[in-house]
């Protein structure tokens, strides 16, 4: 900063002692953050640290429970996101919030269409949209429907839409989460450009190298609390990580169970899941924890859903050495393969039902006496599951939807373990879960592997895969492009595969090795 | 967490009372009390048994509809299906291919039940295998079955002409068992069996799971299509049971048989507290809903201040009020 640190610059936007509670849970407590014109201020923290909540408060999507927002030093209350926009604060969401069937221009101008008389002025909107997209270094026709764009292109359109509003503050919520390094560079360039124009940028990410590259100042949050605000130059990525986690990270992961050497229990040979994955071959042994890494949209979930029979698929699948055909997920379940969806709320648990109903749903045939459900046995199973998986339910008659994310995951795990499977596929095991529970989930996974179950973990958190897996397969554009294990399991090695920079010469990665 | 634990002690048992589940029964009691003020004859045993008897069709079909709706489906064809099954049953009885009237009648009963179940299976397969919205699929079969009935009856009516069978069959609607009209026994048995299947068997649990979330059910290894299809078969079977009562009542069927019964059944189900979006099924609520509909009609007949020609309007209004009450109860919990 050229103006010198002794004369504090006037702050465009300040959050003063912000707190936010949802019910009895305080997700943000007494956090202050200030943005100066022409600076990039990064907010880093783990999932659940309160980054998103902070950002939503600053952009008018949420009201703080306590604390205030100030613009140019004057306190103000936003009535909603539109009001915040009127004050020049725009937000680029992490998720893509575009109407897929409308064109790029129609999306950029949605809700603020240009008109000529009583009709919309498509020509002018297309012209301006084209300009806006080009300004971001992208070459996308404004008349292209969004459904035909790649994820990265959609993200750029979304940025163009946000920046189209006159703005003084731009908040970016993990804009690069699903982008390749090349596309990421384009987004970072956009941020440098608007910063040069004097816009204050709040940048949320947990890609720490990116943060170090672009931020002037860094604020670290942990468990909803403000931990530190430093000049970026004084804070190396390693120190950021230490502040974020706040404890010795090595304890997060349990000891790896001994590596398995026996024959694989589940084998896939050139499996295709039309539209999502092709030519995928892999094998997993009893007692092994196999990771699937890759960018969002690489086809990991779809491949495994195909293998267990949740999606149409082609190719050969062998279970305990014998070829098997899984027409539906029931077939694979009967063989002893379970799949825990990444979408716990939508595909894992009946949120409006009570705990025993959820627990026994997949294994209901074990809970009958003659033709009748044995509720006593269901209740006993719940007690056992609560003990074994440390499910923290304040009341036993709660609905599954009232449990916290971590306890929902434990309940889902308990539900599937009632089937006593040989192979457990867990998709995003710790998404949206606090760090304490994460540690427990890792421990459960390691224990299951130690009991001889084969575990497949799909995760977008590379650290997590590196921490618990014996081997990691990396997918890119529907293909398994690499395998890393042992010393080679590093984030950088995974990234070069995941982004397609490097593809292993060994296309048939594991079928041969197994 | 300590706050939450504190809450469990006082008021715990009160919170367990599900207002949405008992609301229809409260409404029924209020109606019964209101009935006394309208006409002293209302609360007579005879009148009440009469009302309950007439509720039999809606109640029995409603039990089937409770399965379909709580699994997230809908069946608009039940009225037409009643007419179609009744027509074929009568035509079968008229053939007189079996000399012994009793055996003939029993064969007719089997025809009605199997035909109902088969029609339901057709609906179910169109919905699950054909992957057509239940509303559209059963709107289609509603037209088809009504049209077939009109064609079978050539626009007129199909009358039971086998007098031996007719005499034998007559008491099934008009008779009594230990002082209780037979149709009421039909209601009770259908409801008890329905409640047992829905609440106490794995299949019933699967119905509720499918209705709550098809995805969760599928990912839990439940054969969603099969569960759905069977709900329509149950619905068809219940229509078959209703036909068993309908045929002895009038000894005839025509193109207007069962007209708008699908709306009656859906109204009874919704008034009874079953969620139209699926995931909640209340068999006894449905029975209660069927009684409510019949009692409202009865009160209007007995009273002098509302024209009985307005029955349809009042029943329509009941659906809306029931939904509003249901939603306000839902918000509070």
Image (cartoon, rainbow, N blue to C red):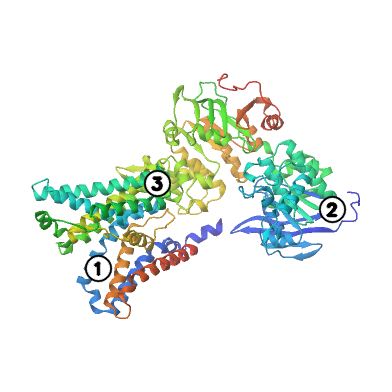
Residue named by callout 2: A198
**Label 2 crowd bin: few (<14), some (14–19), many (20+), radius 10 Å:** some
The alpha-carbon separation of the residues under discs 2 and 1 comes to 79 Å
Q: What mark, if any, has residue A128 been given in the picture?
A: none
> Residue sitting at 41 percent across and 53 percent down?
B135
**Label 3 crowd bin: few (<14), some (14–19), many (20+), radius 10 Å:** many
Eye-nearest disc, 1 or 3:
3
- Answer with left or right where residue B329 lies relative to residue A170: left
SS for callout 1: helix
Number of dots carrying numbers: 3
SS for callout 2: loop
Name the residue at the top extreme: A512
Q: Are marks 3 and 2 on the same chain?
A: no
Residue named by callout 1: B51
Q: Are marks 1 and 3 on the same chain?
A: yes
Q: Chain of mark 3?
A: B
| Marks 1 & 3, CB-CB < 8 Å contact | no
Considering the image in quadrants, where does the N terminus of chain B appear? bottom right
Eye-nearest disc, 3 or 2:
3
The alpha-carbon separation of the residues under discs 1 and 3 comes to 35 Å
Visible residue check, residue A246: no
x and y, in percent, of residue B162 in the image: 11, 54
Residue named by callout 3: B127
> Residue sitting at 36 percent across and 47 percent down?
A376
Q: Chain of mark 2?
A: A
Closest to the observer: B158 or A476?
B158
Q: Chain of mark 1?
A: B
x and y, in percent, of residue B325 in the image: 44, 67
- Answer with left or right where residue B186 lies relative to residue A243: left
SS for callout 3: helix
Res. A84 image quadrant: bottom right
């Amino acid at each position: 900063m050229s103006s010198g640190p002794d004369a504090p610059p006037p702050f465009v936007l300040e959050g003063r002692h912000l707190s936010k509670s949802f019910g009895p849970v305080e997700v943000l407590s007494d956090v202050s953050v200030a943005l100066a014109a022409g600076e990039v201020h990064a907010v880093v923290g783990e999932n659940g640290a309160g980054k998103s909540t902070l950002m939503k408060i600053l952009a008018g999507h949420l009201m703080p429970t306590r604390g205030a927002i100030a613009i140019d030093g004057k306190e103000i209350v936003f009535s909603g996101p539109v009001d915040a926009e009127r004050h020049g604060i725009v937000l680029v969401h992490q998720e893509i919030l575009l109407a897929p069937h409308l064109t790029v221009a129609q999306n950029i101008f949605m809700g603020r269409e240009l008109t000529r008389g009583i009709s919309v002025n498509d020509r002018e909107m297309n012209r301006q949209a084209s300009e806006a997209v080009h300004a971001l270094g992208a070459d996308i026709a404004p008349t292209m429907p969004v459904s035909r764009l790649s994820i990265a292109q959609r993200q750029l359109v979304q940025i163009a839409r946000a920046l189209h509003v006159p703005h003084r503050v731009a908040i970016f919520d993990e804009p690069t989460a699903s982008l390749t390094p090349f596309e990421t560079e384009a987004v970072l360039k956009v941020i440098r450009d608007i910063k040069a124009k004097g816009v204050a940028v709040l940048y949320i990410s947990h890609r720490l190298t990116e943060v170090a590259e672009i931020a002037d100042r860094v604020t670290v949050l942990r468990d909803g609390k403000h931990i530190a605000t430093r000049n970026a130059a004084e804070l190396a990525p390693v120190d950021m990580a230490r502040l974020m986690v706040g404890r010795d990270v090595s304890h997060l992961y349990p000891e790896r169970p001994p590596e398995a050497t026996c024959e694989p229990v589940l084998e896939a040979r050139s499996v295709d899941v039309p539209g999502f994955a092709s030519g995928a071959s892999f094998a997993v042994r009893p007692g092994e924890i196999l990771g699937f890494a890759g960018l969002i949209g690489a086809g990991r979930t779809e491949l495994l859903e195909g293998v267990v029979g949740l999606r149409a698929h082609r190719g050969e699948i062998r279970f305990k050495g014998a070829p098997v055909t899984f027409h539906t997920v029931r077939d694979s379940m009967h063989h002893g393969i379970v799949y825990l969806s990444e979408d716990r709320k939508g595909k894992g648990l009946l949120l409006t039902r009570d705990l025993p109903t959820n627990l026994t749903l997949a294994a209901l045939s074990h809970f009958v006496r003659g033709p009748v459900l044995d509720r006593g046995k269901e209740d006993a199973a719940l007690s056992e599951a609560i003990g074994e998986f440390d499910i923290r339910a304040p009341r036993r008659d709660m609905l599954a939807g009232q449990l916290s994310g971590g306890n929902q995951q434990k309940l889902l795990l308990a539900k599937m373990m009632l089937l006593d499977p040989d192979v457990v596929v867990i998709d995003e095991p710790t998404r949206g879960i606090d760090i304490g529970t994460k540690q427990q989930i890792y421990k459960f996974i390691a224990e299951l592997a130690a009991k001889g179950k084969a575990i497949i973990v799909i995760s977008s958190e590379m650290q997590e895969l590196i921490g618990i897996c014996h081997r990691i397969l990396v997918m890119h554009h529907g293909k398994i492009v690499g395998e890393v294990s042992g010393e080679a399991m590093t984030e950088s090695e995974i990234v070069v595969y995941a982004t397609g920079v490097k593809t292993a010469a060994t296309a048939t990665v594991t079928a041969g090795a197994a | 967490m300590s706050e939450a634990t504190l809450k469990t002690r006082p008021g715990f048992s009160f919170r367990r009372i599900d207002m949405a589940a008992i609301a229809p029964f409260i409404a029924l009691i209020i109606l019964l009390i209101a009935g006394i003020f309208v006409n002293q004859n209302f609360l007579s045993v005879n009148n009440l048994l009469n009302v309950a008897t007439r509720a039999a069709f809606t109640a029995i079909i409603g039990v089937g509809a409770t399965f379909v709706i709580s699994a997230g489906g809908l069946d608009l064809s039940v009225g037409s299906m009643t007419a179609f099954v009744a027509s074929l049953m009568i035509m079968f009885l008229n053939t007189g291919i079996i000399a012994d009237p009793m055996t003939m009648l029993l064969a007719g009963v089997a025809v009605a039940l199997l035909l109902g179940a088969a029609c339901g299976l057709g609906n179910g397969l169109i919905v699950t295998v054909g992957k057509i919205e239940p509303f559209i699929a059963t709107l289609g079969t509603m037209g088809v079955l009504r049209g077939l009935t009109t064609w079978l009856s050539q626009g007129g009516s199909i009358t039971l002409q086998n007098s031996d069978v007719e005499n034998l069959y007559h008491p099934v609607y008009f008779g009594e068992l230990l002082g209780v009209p037979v149709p009421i026994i039909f209601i009770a048995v259908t409801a008890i069996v329905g409640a047992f299947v829905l609440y106490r068997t794995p299949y019933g649990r699967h119905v509720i799971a499918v209705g709550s979330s098809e995805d969760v059910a599928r990912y839990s290894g439940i054969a969603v299509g099969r569960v759905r299809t069977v709900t329509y078969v149950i619905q068809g079977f219940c229509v078959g049971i209703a036909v068993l009562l309908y045929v002895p009542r009038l000894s005839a069927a025509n193109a207007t048989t069962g007209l708008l019964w699908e709306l009656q059944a859906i109204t009874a189900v919704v008034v009874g507290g079953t969620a139209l979006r699926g995931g909640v099924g209340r068999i006894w609520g449905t029975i209660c809903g069927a009684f409510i509909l019949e009692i409202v009609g009865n009160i209007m007949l007995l009273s002098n201040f509302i024209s009985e020609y307005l029955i349809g309007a009042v029943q329509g209004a009941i659906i809306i009020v029931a939904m509003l009450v249901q939603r306000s109860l839902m918000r509070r919990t």
